[in-house]
Image (cartoon, helix red, strand yellow):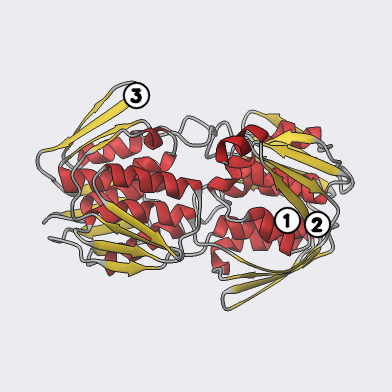
Amino acid sequence: MSKYIVNGGKKLHGKVVVEKSKNAILPIMAASLLVQGKTTITNVPNFSDITAMAKIIESLGAKITFASGNLTIDATTLSDADITCEEAGKIRASVFLMGPVISRMHRCKISKPGGCAIGARPIDIHLSGFEALGVCVQETQNEVLCVLDCFSGGEITLRMASVGATENLIMCSVLGNKTTILHGVAKEPEIVDLCKFLIGAGANIVGEGTDTITIVGVSKLKPTTFTPIADRIVAGTYMLAVALCGGRVQICDINAGHNQRLIDLLARFGCKISCKSDRIYMSSSGFLQANCNIVTGPYPEFATDLQSQIMAVLAGADGVCTITENMFESRFKHVAEFNKMGANIVVHKNTATIFGNSQCYHGQNVKCHDLRGGAGLVISALAAKGTTIIDQIDYIGRGYENFEQKLDSLGADIHRIEDEEEKHNWY
């Protein structure tokens, strides 16, 4: 895999434009299969997960073109209901295709999804929801087969606010002549964005962003063009990098309200933040005081996808803090890498205690274990004394576009080098 070479200790200055949200785009790509015609998604970043999703969709018979940041999906000729190509087992997002494929094809067979190794991430809430809608589900160790005889609609209460299950059940319920009411749903901005896309295509959905969403089925969806929201996790990552490294940065094209919990925390730590229109203006001395107890949870609670990045900051701030991870049981793999760089973090069950020290970080050889943990390591390396080599950075490319170039434009000293074998294969 490729590596980052980071020479730390540089303050960050300038402005950075946040790319559109991967976690919004992937379910919207899946939802495009409900449209018998062309869907165009604009300003799509070049993420490896999006490329993999496009290959899966093409394997089902849809046609895809990608030019100048615009992704067009024509699902008129959707012909296959088996989501079993190689990419389907690599990315978690392949599960989003179940709802639309069941709705369009009345059956779906899928390899159990892959993705970052951050925990078990079962899909039982998805499957029990499908069964409540009239789908017959047969599950083996490696595959799931869903067959729909007659869509029933009705009222469903999710046992927990699963983002993926909420999105899948919405997509499964959009077409037809039944009404579906989903209680206890997730409220993430990406779910609201999916609903906006579907409503723009002619769906009848109300309640998005609340605990209850009602979907009244329609006969068909019309072709549409849609621009997704900006990526709140990417924006949060840049905010945390500025907080730890120090400097003054404008973060552009972002809805600041999507990161309000993080903004409030950073202000408590000593950062200066103001929000105007679609920009966040942020400055930091780089010397933070932090004493807090963070608990990850569904939106609007603190995002699990920012847990490793804020841990990097807390380890480099003065004070003692805890982070309790309630979403995924294996999302502390980055702790050993942070400690290798000089951090003092102790994990007990699902809680990490961070004994912060503003002088702790020094350069070291470390490696990424997943996407967000990798982003956290980059933040630590940017603040460290000396040179850090971060291995296995291909994980980071799953959720950040031109990450090193954007950080370099802010004054960071970060370079990407390719593995020699990869270079040989590429050329």
Q: Quadrant of residue 422?
A: top right
Identify the residue at horizontal 37%, vertical 36% (top origin). 88
Q: CA distance from mark 1 to mark 3?
A: 39 Å
Visible residue check, residue 335: yes
Q: Amino acid at mark 1?
A: Ala
Q: Amino acid at mark 2?
A: Cys
Q: Quadrant of residue 15?
A: bottom right
Label 2 crowd bin: few (<14), some (14–19), many (20+), radius 10 Å: many
Q: Earlier in the sequence, mark 1 or mark 3?
A: 3
Give the residue pinned by disc 1.
Answer: 241
224 relative to 371, above or below: below
Q: Is residue 59 left or right of residue 277?
A: left
Q: CA distance from mark 3 to mark 2?
A: 45 Å
Viewer-side residue, 338 vs 48: 48
Q: Which mark is residue 142?
A: 3
Q: Earlier in the sequence, mark 3 or mark 2?
A: 3
Q: Are marks 2 and 1 in contact (CB under 8 Å)?
A: yes
Q: Secondary structure at mark 2?
A: helix
Viewer-side residue, 229 vs 15: 15
Q: CA distance from mark 2 to mark 1?
A: 6 Å
Q: Which mark is residue 341?
A: none
Q: Is residue 367 left or right of residue 234?
A: right
Q: Secondary structure at mark 3?
A: loop
Give the residue pinned by disc 2.
Answer: 245
Label 3 crowd bin: few (<14), some (14–19), many (20+), radius 10 Å: few
Image position, residue 342 (x, y; %): 84, 37
173 relative to 137, above or below: below
Image position, residue 117 (x, y; %): 53, 32
Q: Amino acid at mark 3?
A: Asn
Visible residue check, residue 209: no
Q: Secondary structure at mark 1?
A: helix
